[in-house]
């Protein structure tokens, strides 16, 4: 039972990382590096909590996605239209998100760093399996936002590999000049990739605020946007690889929490470092070498072809 509880905890911990990592896959497959995922998750978390507080959980998800997409459009405008350095634009969005969330929290709730508790989606159980006591941690009390990301993995793989949209998006990330020559609107495809990353980052923020914590708390993303980028790299820019990496990071986080709760002799500060040490290991190429899209991070100018 203890093992299944850790697995269930790992699945829940992996959800925001998986959603943001899938968003990063869409953005970078189109050729745009999205360091601003962290900021988009912050916007999703704050506005998701605000929407859920005033109008219920469905409105919370809608507000979260809308806020994150607004930030994604800013990133797309800066990097695709004006060809601003993609790293600089992403860092600026992250800083802006912290400021916007704090200002909005003070204005709306008269509190700088938190919102009131917000309602969650009604949990459900998986029929038949919920009659097996040993599986209760995995099949009972599930949120729709917990199930959604795992359904999006095969859907994203199919979109990227089997649809015209996906093939055109990947072409823009590999060779935008060739794609443009064949009549593909590189700018529109890159906008679409960044906007999709905003949608998924907004969902990740909504999950954190509404289902994971039950309220918005400043700093609650805890660098998960950056960990999602590491998961994307570990997964070699593929949805299935991102899933495996997100589960690995989620497991590391779940184990660290369990170790702290069990009163481990190791100081909890070191235990809570496990997911971040794993992130550094992935980014430094210790785990495996990754191959990004050939034009990832490179601005495209039609006049320079």
Image (cartoon, helix red, strand yellow):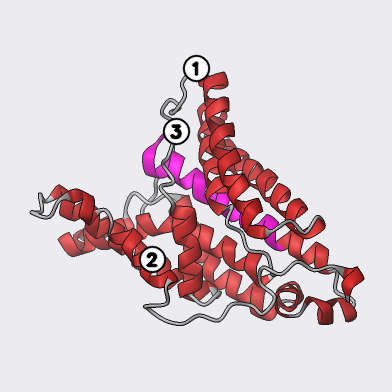
The residue under label 1 is 110
Q: Nearer the viewer, mark 1 or mark 2?
A: 2
**Foreground pick, 78 / 124:** 78
- Alpha carbons under labels 1 and 2: distance apart: 38 Å
The residue under label 2 is 280
Q: Which residue is drawn at 56% across and 33% down?
A: 99
- Alpha carbons under labels 3 and 2: distance apart: 36 Å
Residue 177 in percent (x, y) is at 83, 78
Q: Residue at x 44, y 31 (%)?
A: 118
Which numbered disc flags the more N-terminal residue, 1 or 2?
1
Which type of secondary structure does the marked residue at label 2 adopt? helix
Q: Can residue 156 be seen in this view?
A: yes
Residue 249 in percent (x, y) is at 36, 63
Residue 111 in percent (x, y) is at 46, 21
Estimate how packed mark 2 is, as few (under 14), some (14 to 19) or many (20 or more) residues with alpha carbons within 10 Å. few
Whether tag 1 and tag 2 are in contact, CB under 8 A, the answer is no
């Amino acid at each position: 039972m203890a093992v299944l509880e850790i697995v269930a905890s790992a699945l829940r911990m992996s959800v925001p990382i998986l959603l943001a990592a899938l968003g990063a896959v869409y953005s970078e497959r189109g050729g745009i590096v999205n360091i601003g995922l962290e900021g988009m998750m912050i916007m999703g978390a704050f506005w998701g909590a605000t929407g859920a507080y005033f109008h219920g959980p469905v409105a919370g998800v809608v507000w979260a996605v809308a806020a994150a997409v607004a930030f994604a459009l800013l990133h797309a405008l800066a990097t695709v239209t004006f060809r601003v350095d993609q790293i600089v634009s992403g860092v600026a969005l992250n800083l802006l998100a912290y400021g916007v969330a704090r200002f909005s929290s003070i204005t709306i709730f008269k509190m700088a760093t938190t919102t009131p508790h917000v309602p969650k989606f009604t949990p459900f159980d998986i029929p038949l399996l919920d009659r097996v006591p040993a599986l209760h941690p995995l099949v009972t009390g599930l949120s729709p936002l917990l199930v959604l990301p795992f359904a999006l993995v095969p859907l994203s793989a199919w979109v990227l590999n089997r649809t015209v949209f996906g093939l055109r998006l990947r072409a823009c990330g590999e060779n935008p000049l060739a794609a443009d020559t064949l009549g593909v609107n590189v700018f529109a495809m890159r906008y679409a990739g960044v906007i999709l990353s905003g949608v998924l980052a907004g969902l990740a923020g909504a999950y954190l605020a509404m289902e994971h914590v039950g309220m918005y708390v400043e700093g609650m993303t805890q660098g998960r946007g950056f960990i999602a980028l590491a998961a994307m790299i570990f997964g070699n820019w593929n949805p299935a690889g991102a899933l495996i990496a997100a589960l690995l990071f989620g497991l590391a986080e779940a184990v660290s929490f369990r170790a702290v709760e069990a009163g481990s002799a190791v100081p909890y500060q070191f235990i809570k470092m496990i997911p971040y040490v794993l992130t550094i290991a992935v980014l430094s190429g210790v785990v495996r070498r990754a191959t990004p899209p050939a034009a990832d991070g490179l601005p495209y100018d039609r006049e320079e072809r």
